[in-house]
Image: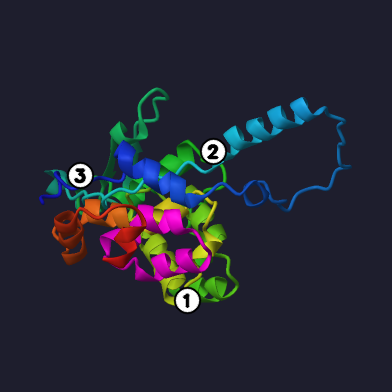
Amino acid sequence: LSDNAKPQFTDPTVQDILTRITGLDLQKVFRPIKQELKPPTYKLMTDEQLEQAVELAKEQAKKLLQMPPVLSERKPINDVLSEDKILDGMDTAKYVFTDITYNIPHRERFIVVREPSGTLRKATWEERDRLIQVYFPKDGRKLTAPLIFKEENLKMVFSQDRHEDVLDLCLVQFEPDSSEYIRVHAATYEDLDKHGKYDLLRSTRHFGGMTWYLLNARRVDGLIVDMLKRELLQDAVSLVSLFHMVHPHSESAQEAATQQTTGTDLLKV
């Protein structure tokens, strides 16, 4: 299948399966976070009110579990607009010109750089990200990426089982089609797969992205085994079905199609 014909991460069927196998553990979704301590609030409820509160919590949890986007890496910007040799050596610093009009989408914002050599070019993605953060600060994002994202520091954080924290911070710091965003996500998923720690992301918004990464890498055996060990039989069946959708020419997919296998029998193929 061509890339266009293959199921995509955003396809409703794919999203439905990934959402289903992510799980909905309210205790995990709403676990306490470090913040200023306040006295607890107690409420007396009837059984009916309690049911309504639980349903409301489930709806809120579903919103919190919405999966971050999975995108291809953006193409580098190498556009030179002009070469003005008359300006060569006039200054030792670069000059950056940024359109700071408020109602323009950041992706369409015009940003150019005048080099000391006189070259006028479009800003690179990294320059754009930094300048947009200067003029339109995003909460939590730093002008310089935190040191936690360096490879040696990631290993230490992973050893503390803080994979979810890394991914949450990555979402804030980088654009989803940037090379750094993709690198950090891949490193996190690889570590989880290597050590079989899939459950750290279960019932979080990152579980679907991890599953999709492993699916495309054709490395879902460890995750299937983990599901079976946790008696998540239906999740394992759903994962195998999705694998066959993404890789219809794989040996197991063709065998399942030939034998018209469905349900738990898919796990035997």
Q: Which residues are drawn in magenta?
A: 213-239
Mark 1 or mark 2: name the one nearer the start of the chain.
2
The percent position of residue 9, horizontal first and vertical second, equals 31, 46
Q: Is residue 92 visible?
A: no
- Report the disc number at residue 120: 3
Give the foreground label among 3 and 2. 2
| Res 144 seen here | yes
User: Is residue 219 a member of the stretch shown in magenta?
Assistant: yes
Badge 2 marks a residue whose secondary structure is helix
Judged left or right of residue 44, residue 133 is left
Residue type, mark 2 in image:
Lys
Q: Residue at x 83, y 29 (%)?
A: 45
As measured in the structure, the alpha-carbon distance from the residue carrying label 3 to the one carrying label 2 is 47 Å
Q: Where is 150 relative to 57, above or below?
A: below
Give the structural element (helix, strand or loop) at label 3. Answer: strand
Rounded to the nearest angstrom, the CA distance separating label 1 from label 2 is 28 Å
Distance between the alpha carbons at the discs numbered 1 and 3? 49 Å
Circle on res. 195: 1
Residue at 42% x, 76% y is: 194
Residue 4: percent from left, percent from top: 14, 44
In this view, the residue farthest toward the top is 103
Residue type indicated by callout 3? Leu
Vertical position of residue 246 compared to residue 65: above or below: below
Q: Residues within 10 Å of mark 2 (few under 14, many from 20)?
A: some
Comes first in the chain, label 3 or label 2: 2
- The residue type indicated by label 1 comes to His
Say which quarter of the image contains residue 267.
bottom left
**Direction from residue 234 to residue 125 in the image, left or right:** left
Q: Which residue is mark 2?
A: 62
Q: Position of residue 16 (x, y in %)?
A: 39, 41
Local packing at callout 3 (Cα closer than 10 Å; few below 14, some 14-19, many 20+) is many
